[in-house]
Every structure is written in structure tokens, then in C-alpha cells.
Image (cartoon, grey):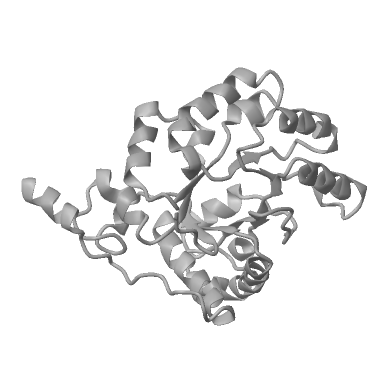
């Protein structure tokens, strides 16, 4: 029987050199970073597919390095969402799904991130896309146009549409990022790029998905983390299996933000097991590989 965590927690990347020795075991090679990451977290975002697709060989290699309970959440290519605006995308979608097919059940929810220009007028294209999306693949839609935050007919129609197709709405929260002035260049850059949209704490189905955009000073995110811990606990107790992704302007800090969220969740749900301590210790296979270098 495959192990299934109560919820899945992760970062926007699984490989950052600065994590080696600080989070991951000392001397972890690039080829072992994903395997080491899976000892701490049960999912990872795949933002790179927004810009370019990996090779089938790379995806098969990823699959060989992860446990069965681990899930990738890949973003659909910008050629589909931004350049072609959900029109004449069929070949791009087929290629996207083909490349990721080696992951099998380890392919978690894919994310359809629409541009800020995609408002109510894009509704028919969204419906057409959902009609052609494979029903056996989880999907979450991230919206950034004000039309979808009207707390009125537009938003109600959207939620009916997503519910009909079994699709989640991404819960995007950038409040922590903008809660204080920037204290470093990466935060200033993130504040210039990230959207500021109203927060929707909504679960339409079994796998609500949260993208939490925090700060490098992770303790400054505590008020927002406490809010989300309460919400995620409710979802878990309802029998749902949420995905929660922690972003920081500098990816180096993302694991610490994720740990801080998990600690808040453990306060609400004392039955939740803590994350492993880090830096992780090298496994026997890691030591064997190092001995060959």
C-alpha cells in the first residue's frame, strides 16, 4: 500500500546549490539533489515547464529518483496560456502531456496560470480547454484578472465551471511579500513582478492548492502562516489532501518558510509528525557515490 501524507508541502524548486550542507547533506551532487529533497518534502512545483519542456530522458530520470508518494506540480507552457491565449494549443498540450507521461501517478496537479489580461471574455476559451483536458489528470487554474475576484456573477460562474470539471482554483497569497518594504534586492525585484490579487481560501475538490508568496525573513510571515494553518487543518479534517507551496524571493529561504508553516500546522494538529531535522545526513548510497569521486 502506497504511503499518502495528510497534505503535501513543498518549494518552487528541488535543487538550489545553497541548500547543500545547509538543508541537504554535505557534498550532495546535482544528480542527487532531487532524491535528497524528497526526504524532506512530498511535492515540488515545476515552474520551468512554463518556459521550456524537459526531455523524456530527464523526466524518466526524475521518476527513478522519487518515492511513489511524491508529486510534481508542473505549470503549463506559456505558449498555451500567454502566447496562444488558449487557442490552437492542441499540439502544445499533447507534447506537454507526452513529455511528463513517464511520471505516471507521480504527476500531481498541473497548473494553468492565465495572464492578467484574461478576464471574463476568456471564459469560453477556458471552458473549451477544460473540455479537452484529460479527466484523469488533476488541474488547478490560477487567475489574475479582476473579473474573477468580483464576489458576484463572474466568480460564481467560474467556480461552477471549475467544479463541473473537477478542477481546483489556485489559492494565491502574495500578502506576506507586500506586507513590509523590501529589505534586500531579491524582495524588491519580487515586489516589482508578483501580482497583488485578493486572496481566495477555497477548496472546490479533493486537492486544494496554495501558492504562498513569502519573504526572505520568514518570521515576518507568521500572521499569514497561522491563518493558512487553520484553513489547511480544516481541509484535512474534511478529508481533503491539500498541496501547499512556499515561495521566497530568494529560493534559498523557501525550505525554512515551509518548515515554519508546518510548525504552525502542528500547533493546530498536534497529531501531525514534524519535518526531519536538517541538514540531512548522507545515505549509504550517497557515501558510496562520494567514495568513487
Residue 66 x, y percent position in the rendering: 36, 48
Locate the C terminus by quadrant. top left
292 shown above or below 191: above
x and y percentages locating residue 38 in the rendered image: 37, 55
Image height of 245 relative to 257, above or below:
above
Residue at screen point 59% across, 61% down: 177
Q: Residue at x 48, y 31 (%)?
A: 101
Residue 293 showing in the rendered view: no
In this picture, is 174 found above or below 130?
Answer: below
Q: Provide residue 253's location: percent of width, then percent of height.
A: 42, 62
Taking 128 as reference, is 269 above or below it? below
Hey, which residue is sitting farthest right in the picture?
Answer: 153
Kindly indicate the quadrant of the structure image that contains residue 58: top left
Q: Position of residue 196 (x, y in %)?
A: 69, 54
Residue 130 makes an appearance in the image: yes
Horizontal arrangement in the rendering, residue 123 relative to residue 239 (left or right): right
240 displayed left or right of 103: right
Of 194 and 288, nearer the camera is: 288
Residue 2's quadrant in the figure? bottom left
Residue farthest along the left direction in this orientation: 292
Residue at point 36%, 40% (across, down): 62
Amino acid at each position: 500500500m502506497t504511503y499518502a501524507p495528510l497534505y503535501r508541502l513543498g518549494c518552487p524548486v528541488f535543487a538550489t546549490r545553497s541548500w547543500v550542507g545547509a538543508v541537504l547533506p554535505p557534498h550532495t551532487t546535482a544528480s542527487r539533489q532531487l532524491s535528497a529533497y524528497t526526504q524532506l518534502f512530498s511535492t515540488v512545483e515545476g515552474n520551468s515547464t512554463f518556459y521550456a519542456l524537459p526531455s523524456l530522458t530527464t523526466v524518466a530520470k526524475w521518476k527513478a529518483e522519487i518515492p511513489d508518494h511524491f508529486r510534481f506540480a508542473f505549470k503549463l507552457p506559456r505558449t498555451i496560456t500567454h502566447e496562444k491565449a488558449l487557442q490552437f494549443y492542441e499540439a502544445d498540450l499533447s507534447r506537454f502531456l507526452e513529455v511528463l507521461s513517464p511520471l505516471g501517478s507521480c504527476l500531481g496537479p498541473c497548473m494553468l496560470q492565465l495572464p492578467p489580461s484574461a478576464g471574463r471574455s476568456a471564459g469560453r476559451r477556458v471552458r473549451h480547454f477544460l473540455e479537452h483536458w484529460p479527466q484523469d489528470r488533476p488541474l488547478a487554474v490560477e487567475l489574475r484578472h479582476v473579473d474573477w475576484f468580483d464576489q458576484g456573477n463572474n466568480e460564481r460562474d467560474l467556480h461552477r465551471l471549475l467544479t463541473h470539471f473537477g478542477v481546483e482554483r489556485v489559492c494565491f497569497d502574495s500578502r506576506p511579500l507586500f506586507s513590509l518594504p523590501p529589505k534586500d534586492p531579491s524582495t524588491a525585484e519580487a515586489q516589482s513582478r508578483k501580482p497583488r490579487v485578493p486572496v481566495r481560501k477555497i477548496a472546490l475538490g479533493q486537492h486544494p492548492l496554495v501558492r504562498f508568496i513569502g519573504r526572505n525573513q520568514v518570521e515576518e510571515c507568521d500572521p499569514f502562516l497561522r491563518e493558512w494553518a487553520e484553513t489547511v487543518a480544516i481541509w484535512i479534517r474534511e478529508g481533503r489532501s491539500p498541496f501547499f507551496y512556499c515561495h521566497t524571493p530568494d529560493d534559498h529561504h523557501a525550505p525554512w518558510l515551509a518548515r515554519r508553516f508546518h510548525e504552525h500546522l502542528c500547533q493546530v494538529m498536534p497529531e501531525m509528525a514534524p519535518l526531519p531535522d536538517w541538514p540531512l545526513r548522507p545515505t549509504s548510497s550517497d557515501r558510496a557515490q562520494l567514495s568513487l569521486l
